[in-house]
Every structure is written in structure tokens, then in C-alpha cells.
């Protein structure tokens, strides 16, 4: 399965602190799935996700960051999703246009909205 990850609000809080359980979450998803960045920090072929997170996540997380692949999208994050594969998309905010695309593909249930106070779970 493919996993698509946003950064702000998912891996780190809006204040830049690591979310609870982030290390075990990253370890689990990278060990069991193909993981991709789906974030404004990786857009249009550019990727500064690792540099952005290096000083924000615990040291044990850094090795996992290098195993996450970039996506290429320009307007909607859904442009970076491979709809021919099973996937989960972790994000804290999704635009209405992106929700519409998910619905068109009958994949809205693949979206995992992460709230401000949500803990990342170790198994999925």
C-alpha cells in the first residue's frame, strides 16, 4: 500500500513540535508500506521536506525521512496520488477540490484527517 504524508499538522504540530508517537509511526509505515511526501514542502518536483524536518523531529526519525519518496504535484495534492494503487493519505487539511477528486475515484475513505490533538497510531 502507498502512504502519502503531509508534514505540518501531521508529523509536527503547527508550532513545529513533533507529534506524539511520530518515531514509532514513521518506523511502522516505512517498514510496511511505500511512503511518499504529499506536502507543500515537496511540490512541483522540488523537495525540501528533510531539511525542513531535521531540526524539528527526534534524531531517531531522521533515518526514516530519507526513505520517503517525493511526489510531483502543482495545484492539488491529489495530482501526486496514484489512484491505481491502494493508499492512505494523512493530512490535517484537504481542500474541497481535493475532496471532490477523492470522491470521483471513490477513495474518500482513504483520507486520514489528523486533528491538532490527535496522536499518531502505531498500526494501520
Image (cartoon, rainbow, N blue to C red):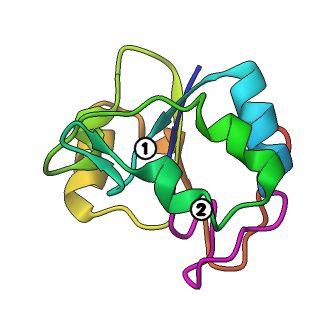
State the residue position of label 2: 10
Magenta segment's dominant SS is loop
Which label was assigned to residue 17?
none
Q: Which of label 2 and label 1 is nearer to you?
A: 2
Q: Is residue 92 left or right of residue 106?
A: right
Residue that protrudes farthest toward the left in the picture: 75
Q: Secondary structure at mark 2?
A: loop
Q: Mark 2 and mark 1: span between their CA atoms? A: 18 Å
Question: Looking at the image, which residue is at 72% across and 33% down?
Answer: 29
Q: Is residue 81 left or right of residue 61?
A: left
Question: Looking at the image, which residue is at 61% across and 40% down?
Answer: 65
Front one among 41 and 78: 41
The residues colored magenta run 8-21
Q: Is residue 20 left or right of residue 69?
A: right
Which label was assigned to residue 108?
1
How many marks the image carries: the answer is: 2
Question: Looking at the image, which residue is at 70% across and 61% down?
Answer: 57
Residue 27 spot, x, y in % from top left: 80, 36
Closer to the chain start, of discs 2 and 1, is 2
Q: Secondary structure at mark 1?
A: helix
Residue that protrudes farthest toward the bottom in the picture: 15
Residue 41 spot, x, y in % from top left: 36, 55
Front one among 25 and 47: 47
Q: Is residue 52 above or below residue 48?
A: below
Q: Is residue 15 above or below residue 79?
A: below
Residue that protrudes farthest toward the top in the picture: 84
Q: Is residue 6 visible?
A: no
Q: Residues within 10 Å of mark 2 (few under 14, many from 20)?
A: many
Question: Looking at the image, which residue is at 30% across and 30% down?
Answer: 105
Q: Quadrant of the C terminus?
A: top right
Residue 50 spot, x, y in % from top left: 51, 48
Q: Is residue 71 above or below residue 40?
A: above
Amino acid at each position: 500500500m502507498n502512504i502519502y504524508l503531509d508534514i505540518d499538522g501531521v508529523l509536527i504540530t503547527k508550532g513545529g513540535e513533533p507529534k506524539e508517537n511520530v518515531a514509532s509511526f514513521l518506523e511502522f509505515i516505512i517498514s510496511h508500506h511505500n511512503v511518499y511526501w504529499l506536502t507543500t514542502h515537496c511540490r512541483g518536483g522540488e523537495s525540501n521536506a528533510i531539511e525542513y524536518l531535521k531540526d524539528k523531529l527526534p534524531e531517531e526519525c531522521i533515518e526514516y525521512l530519507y526513505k520517503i519518496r517525493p511526489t510531483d504535484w502543482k495545484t492539488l495534492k491529489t495530482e501526486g496520488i496514484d489512484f491505481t494503487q491502494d493508499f492512505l493519505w494523512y493530512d490535517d487539511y484537504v481542500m474541497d477540490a481535493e475532496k471532490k477528486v477523492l470522491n470521483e475515484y471513490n477513495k474518500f475513505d482513504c483520507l486520514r484527517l489528523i486533528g491538532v490533538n490527535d496522536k499518531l497510531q502505531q498500526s494501520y
